């Protein structure tokens, strides 16, 4: 089954304690991205990766790190979490092919989300 | 500056009637538009998309209309069903550009009442 898997799904932590949210996709997608969803703000992009070893900042990258050592994995790292990083996080992937059309609907496949609370 | 705007945070319609969700964008370079649906405790799922070379795309009960001159798109759901109750995100991208990232609106919560 094609899917994007995030772990953990729920986490409560304290300020300053480093944590990693893992993301793995089994669709051989080139493009992967992290979003956070906050009330009234919708989905905001944190970081994205066009391919292995290629990452770039999204709209709200402060306080986050990512790495893309393998095609299937794209972990999100919070080196020193703060309460303003309390949010619902989504990992997503897509083929990343820019051909329009056919072959690319631009569709992103999302994971089920990771709810993070930083006390 | 918001490049993709969904100005209605919520919408309530009666089952069987039409739901119209609106989205405006500011970046004239956007050439691909998508709608995603999100249920509570789940990730967003792709619903329907439209390329800027078209002005309408239809998939079953869902139709997306694109008005490039007005920089406006809308999602029509006919007939609306209670299972359509969800948050709907509009998204846009300049896939011909250098990044091809999706920019999302803030979402509209649709409630379909039986």
Image (cartoon, helix red, strand yellow):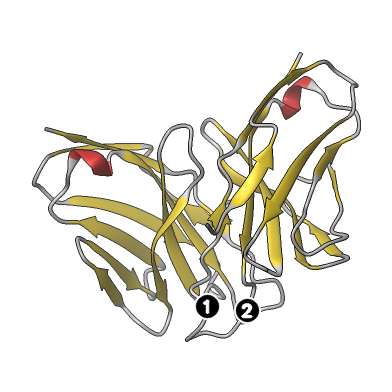
A70 sits left or right of B74 in the view: right
**Is residue A62 among the parts visible in the rendering?**
no
**Chain ID, mark 2:** A
Q: What residue appears at the point 24 percent right and 41 percent down from the top-left corner? A: B83
Vertical arrangement, residue A78 with respect to residue A12, above or below: below
Q: Which mark is residue A9?
A: none
Q: Position of residue A81 (x, y in %)?
A: 84, 26
Q: Position of residue A63 (x, y in %)?
A: 85, 37
- In the image shown, does B10 or A7 lie closer to the viewer? A7
Q: Position of residue B60 (x, y in %)?
A: 21, 65
Q: What residue appears at the point 70 percent right and 71 percent down from the top-left corner? A: B99
Q: Which residue lies most toward the front here?
A: A1
**Is residue A79 among the parts visible in the rendering?**
yes
Q: Quadrant of residue A79?
A: top right
Q: Is disc 2 in contact with disc 1, using a CB cutoff of under 8 Å?
A: yes
* Residue bearing mark 2: A97
Label 1 secondary element: loop
- In the image shown, does B72 or A9 lie closer to the viewer? A9
* Residue bearing mark 1: A104
Q: Quadrant of residue B13?
A: top left
B42 sits left or right of B59 in the view: right
Q: What residue appears at the point 74 percent right and 54 percent down from the top-left corner? A: A58
Q: What residue appears at the point 58 percent right and 62 percent down from the top-left corner? A: B102
């Amino acid at each position: 089954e094609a899917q994007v898997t995030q772990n953990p799904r729920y986490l409560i932590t304290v300020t300053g304690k480093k944590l990693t949210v893992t993301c793995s996709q089994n669709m051989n997608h080139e493009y992967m991205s992290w979003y956070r969803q906050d009330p009234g703000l919708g989905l905001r992009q944190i970081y994205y990766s066009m391919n292995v070893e290629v990452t770039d900042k999204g709209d709200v990258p402060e306080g986050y790190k990512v790495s893309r050592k393998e095609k299937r994995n794209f972990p999100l790292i919070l080196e020193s979490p703060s309460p303003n990083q309390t949010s619902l996080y989504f990992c997503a992937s897509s083929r990343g092919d820019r051909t329009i059309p056919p072959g690319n609907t631009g569709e992103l496949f999302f994971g089920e989300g990771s709810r993070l609370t930083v006390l | 500056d918001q490049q993709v705007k969904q100005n209605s945070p919520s919408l309530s319609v009666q089952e069987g009637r039409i739901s119209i969700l609106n989205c405006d964008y500011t970046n004239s370079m956007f050439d691909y538009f998508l709608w995603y649906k999100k249920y509570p405790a789940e990730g967003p799922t792709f619903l329907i998309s439209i390329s800027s070379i078209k002005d309408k795309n239809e998939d079953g009960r869902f139709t997306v209309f694109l008005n490039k001159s007005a920089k406006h798109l809308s999602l029509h759901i006919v007939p609306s069903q209670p299972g359509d109750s969800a948050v709907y995100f509009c998204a846009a991208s300049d896939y011909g550009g250098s990044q091809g990232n999706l920019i999302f609106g803030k979402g509209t919560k649709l409630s379909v009442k039986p």
